[in-house]
Image (spheres, helix red, strand yellow):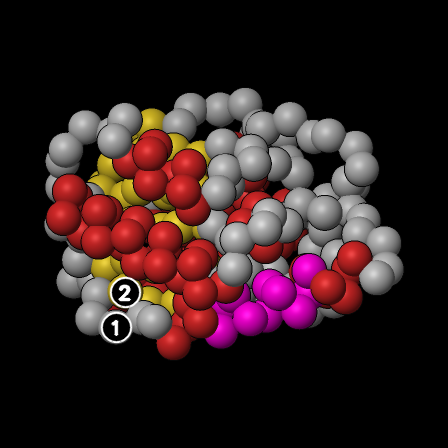
Amino acid sequence: MPTLPEPVGLRQGLSGVGKQLKLLIIGDSAAAGVGVEHQRKALLGNLVSNLESHHQVNWQLHAQTGATTIETIKEVDNIGKQKFDVIITSLGVNDVTSRISAREWLTKQLQLREKLIAKFSPKLLILSSLPPMGKIPALPQPLRWYVGARAEEFDQLLQLSCHGITHHLPIKIGSISDMIAKDGFHPSAGLYKIWGQQVAQMIRERVN
């Protein structure tokens, strides 16, 4: 599988007009935008562009290729204590391909959630769904079938665990072939655009 770099571009900034909205995106290579060349075309850029006409968006991105939930819990310690209105996570793919069990992973997800809420007091915590790993072309069979089944199990547990300010976001896409970057694994610009639109819609519906 070709190794794609994380995109260039600012990971912290302020843009738009209107009521201030503080955003934090945290997680793995998909959160970081691997698959496109610039943050403008990644999740961050698409999300900000969908919100900045009605909000002054104050945004931060803390994400790294290969990050697991356990590593992201540690990364939270490196972020200064502050208030975020919305936090978006993208995690699970690297956990699925590790040896962690689904139940153990859920325990770590709950630990991460508690830490994010205690430190940043968000109004909304959006947990992006795991991708359909059983359809990712870069993975050979039977590995594709195996990780696909694990990803479905992980995502179901994630969805069932949501309550209060925490919401699961099932990313709705069309043909998977149009949504994958040239490495056959990461999101394409088209998928990041859809993802950003759907996150923005949830924010508009749930945050005043």
Residue at screen point 30% across, 49% down: 112
Question: Would you name the residue on which mark 1 appears?
Answer: 163
Instruction: Looking at the picture, tell me which residue is in the foreground, 201 or 5.
Output: 5
- Answer yes or no: is residue 142 visible: yes
Residue at screen point 54% across, 23% down: 8
Q: Quadrant of the N terminus?
A: top right
Q: Amino acid at mark 1?
A: His
Q: Is residue 131 left or right of residue 1?
A: left
Instruction: Looking at the picture, tell me which residue is in the foreground, 181 or 196.
Output: 181
Q: Which mark is residue 166?
A: 2
**Within 10 angstroms of label 2, few (less than 14), some, or many (20 or more) residues?**
some
**Within 10 angstroms of label 1, few (less than 14), some, or many (20 or more) residues?**
few
Does 204 lie within the magenta span? no
What element does badge 2 sit on?
Answer: strand
Q: Position of residue 67 (x, y in %)?
A: 50, 38
- Answer yes or no: is residue 18 visible: no
| Quadrant assignment, res 204 | bottom left
Residue at screen point 79% across, 57% down: 143
Q: Position of residue 20 (x, y in %)?
A: 17, 44
Instruction: Looking at the picture, tell me which residue is in the foreground, 142 or 80.
Output: 142
Which span is picked out in magenta?
A: 147-156
